[in-house]
Amino acid sequence: MGTAPQPGLHVVNHPLIQHKLTQMRRKETPSPTFRQLLTETSLLLAYEVTRELALDQVRVETPLVSMEAPQLVDVPVVVSILRAGNGLLEGVLQVLPEARVGHVGLYRDHETLEAVEYYCKFPPLADRMVILVDPMLATGNSATAALDRVKAESPAAIRFLCLLAAPEGVAAVHAAHPDVAVWTAAVDECLNEVGYILPGLGDAGDRIYGTT
């Protein structure tokens, strides 16, 4: 498993992330444990996707002296692709508790594999950094549709954060949105005939929420 380095793709090979991903892959891992592992992993991934955020210098008073210290120029907006995106959202918000949050609801038509939108609500995105989150980047149809909606609001930049990706999904996102970089814990081998990532971990939403 894995992929050769390519522009716009960041595979985070931190040992803790890889260990937790393995636990999530196990079919016997129950939903409560899966959710906890996903929150922990998303917190670690959030450190990486925010690594190059812009900083400014501000004057602060410590208990002892006055000093110049770095502070974020702007806190990104986090947009979750419903419903599974909320599984990543919790960990990201632990790192960025001040972030405003948007949601775009998409489901996959099982006949066409195309994304169908059923809900969308964003805070102001114009000229803001946006982190779009969804655990699985499979066909790329949902991600591309969500990116289309986000871009219509004229953000300054967008970063896509997922737990697991297929090569087909990465290629689809980069073909439609070459300016959007992808952060993920792993790029798996391929998609099966119904658009699920192999070897993968099954349907992320079902694993998170205990549905079938």
Image (cartoon, rainbow, N blue to C red):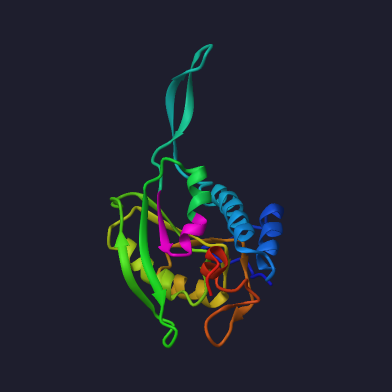
* Residue 149 position by quadrant: bottom left
Q: Nearer the viewer, residue 210 or 78?
A: 210
Q: Examine the rendered structure and indicate whether residue 104 appears above or below residue 199.
A: above
Give coordinates of residue 62: x percent, y percent: 51, 17
Residue visible at 34% across and 52% down in the picture: 156
* Residue lying at the far top of the rendered structure: 64
Kindly identify the residue that appears in the image at 51 percent across and 46 percent down.
Answer: 52
Instruction: Check if residue 110 falls in the magenta segment.
Output: no
Residue 44 at x, y percent in the picture: 60, 50
The location of residue 35, given as percent across then percent down, is 58, 58
Q: Quadrant of residue 189?
A: bottom right
What number of labels is visible? 0
* Quadrant in which the N terminus is drawn: bottom right
User: What residue sits 43% from the left and 67% below the top?
Assistant: 178
Q: Position of residue 43 (x, y in %)?
A: 57, 49
Query: Along the line of sight, which residue is nearer the eye, 150 or 200?
Result: 200
| Residue 176 visible to the viewer | no
Residue at left offset 49%, top offset 77%: 139
Which residues are the magenta region?
77-88
